[in-house]
């Protein structure tokens, strides 16, 4: 299964490193990543493989959200099933 991770906030050093480290901590493999800096604002979308996730999905999502609060960012993690359901007519 996959997850979609989004990160938005003011640009700062180490955003990708921090999010990647949190993924590695939970055995989540990053499959694709795209990021942009517009003026001073950072935006990133990651697709991650969560098949080897070593906790429940909610704990991983909460850990990313807490990381976002610590860094002054908005980090959201959505399970592929939810994402697909939202975009199916």
Image: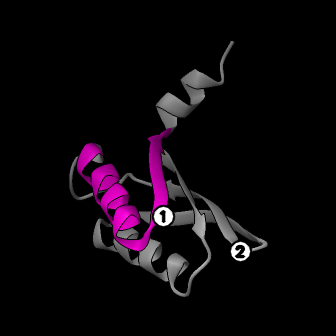
* Residue segment shown in magenta: 58-79
Look at the magenta stretch and give its main secondary structure. helix
Q: Where residue 1 appears, x then y in whole percent?
A: 45, 44
Q: Does residue 75 belong to the magenta stretch?
A: yes
For label 2, count other residues whose C-alpha is less than 10 Å away and answer few (under 14), some (14-19) or many (20+).
few
The residue nearer to you, when weighing 23 against 52, is 23
Q: Which mark is residue 17?
A: none
Q: Does residue 49 belong to the magenta stretch?
A: no
For this orientation, the residue located farthest to the right is 39
For this orientation, the residue located farthest to the top is 89
Query: Marks 2 and 1, Cα distance to the nearest angstrom?
Result: 13 Å
Within the image, what quadrant is residue 47 found in? Answer: bottom right
Residue 23 relative to residue 80: left or right: left
Residue 29 relative to residue 47: left or right: left
Residue drawn at (51%, 85%), measured in percent from left and top? 14
Q: Which residue does the numbered mark 1 point to in the structure image?
A: 73
The residue nearer to you, when weighing 41 against 23, is 41
Q: Where residue 13 appears, x then y in whole percent?
A: 55, 87
Q: Which residue does the numbered mark 2 point to in the structure image?
A: 40
Residue drawn at (41%, 72%), measured in percent from left and top? 71
């Amino acid at each position: 299964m996959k997850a979609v991770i989004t990160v938005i906030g003011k640009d700062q050093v180490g955003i990708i490193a921090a999010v990647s480290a949190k993924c590695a901590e939970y055995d989540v493999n990053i499959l694709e990543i795209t990021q942009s800096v517009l003026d001073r604002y950072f935006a990133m979308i990651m697709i991650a493989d969560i098949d080897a996730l070593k906790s429940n999905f909610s704990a991983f999502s909460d850990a990313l959200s807490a990381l976002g609060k610590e860094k002054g960012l908005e980090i959201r993690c959505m399970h592929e099933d939810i994402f697909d359901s939202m975009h199916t007519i």
